[in-house]
Structures are given as structure tokens and as C-alpha cells.
């Protein structure tokens, strides 16, 4: 089981930026693809972005050009830089090692119009 701690959420105005971080425990991090997901009340958790162990990113259409996922394997940390935020980006953001059942507690992002 991988332990995950997300941080960096907050309240911002539309057009603002936030940088989320996810610190992971364990030795599997560097060889595991990671994903960022978000969830809003009444909706299923949706995939926002993924990054392979080698650093290749992939994004949901709704965040392309605004969000950047990156990772630092030396620090066992994955990041999500979010720019030009919109109210529709509001939700709880979770990181997740793909292919595992591990989830963190999430970090809340709220974007006001």
C-alpha cells in the first residue's frame, strides 16, 4: 500500500493559478505511472492528467493547455500546475498510482467567478 499526501489546494479567483503536490511513500514510485483525479459532489471521480514513469504526460481535454503534470522521482512527488483556473475546475483533487488501490485524502480546490 502506497501512502499519499496531497497539498496545495485553496480558494482562488477565476484566472488564477495553484500548484498541487502529492508526496508518495514507498520504493515503487519511480516506476509507477501517476494520475491526478478530481471529484465534485454528485459526480464520479474524473481523470485530469497522468504521467508515465518516464515523464510522458497526458491530459483530459478540459484541462489541456492550462494544466501541467510533472514528477520528481528523487522526491517521490508528483505535481499539478494549474493555470487559468475556471469555476468548473472546483473539486477535491486526488493523486493515484495507476494500477494500485491507493488514494490520498485529497486537497480541495475552489475557484470563484
Image: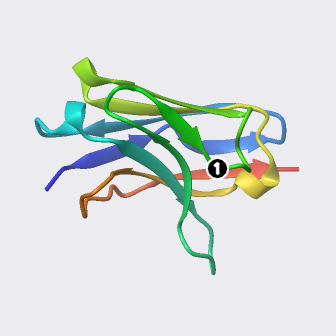
Q: Position of residue 19 (x, y in %)?
A: 56, 31
- In the picture, measured across the screen, residue 105 lies left or right of residue 60, that is left
Per the image, the residue denoted by label 1 is 60
Q: Secondary structure at mark 1?
A: loop
| Residue 103 higher or lower than 66, as above or below | below
User: Dividing the image into 4 quarters, which one contains the N terminus?
Assistant: bottom left
Q: Residue at 27% of width from left, 23% of height from top?
A: 73
Q: Position of residue 75 (x, y in %)?
A: 26, 22
Q: Position of residue 67 (x, y in %)?
A: 65, 35
| Residue 46 higher or lower than 30, as above or below | below
- In the picture, measured across the screen, residue 17 lies left or right of residue 74, that is right
Q: Quadrant of residue 49?
A: top right
- In the picture, measured across the screen, residue 61 lies left or right of residue 37, that is right
Q: Residue at 46% of width from left, 31% of height from top?
A: 79
Which residue ends up furthest to the bottom in the rendered image? 42
In-front residue for pair 40/48? 48
Q: Position of residue 28 (x, y in %)?
A: 15, 39
Q: Residue at 83% of width from left, 35% of height from top?
A: 15
Which residue ends up furthest to the right in the rendered image? 113
Amino acid at each position: 500500500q502506497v501512502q499519499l499526501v496531497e497539498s496545495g489546494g485553496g480558494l482562488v479567483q477565476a484566472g488564477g493559478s495553484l500548484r498541487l503536490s502529492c508526496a508518495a511513500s514507498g520504493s515503487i514510485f519511480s516506476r509507477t505511472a501517476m494520475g491526478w483525479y478530481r471529484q465534485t459532489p454528485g459526480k464520479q471521480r474524473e481523470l485530469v492528467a497522468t504521467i508515465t514513469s518516464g515523464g510522458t504526460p497526458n491530459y483530459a481535454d478540459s484541462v489541456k493547455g492550462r494544466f501541467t503534470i510533472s514528477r520528481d522521482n528523487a522526491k517521490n512527488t508528483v505535481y499539478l500546475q494549474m493555470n487559468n483556473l475556471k469555476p468548473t475546475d472546483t473539486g477535491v483533487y486526488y493523486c493515484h498510482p495507476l494500477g494500485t488501490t491507493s488514494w490520498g485524502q485529497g486537497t480541495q480546490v475552489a475557484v470563484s467567478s
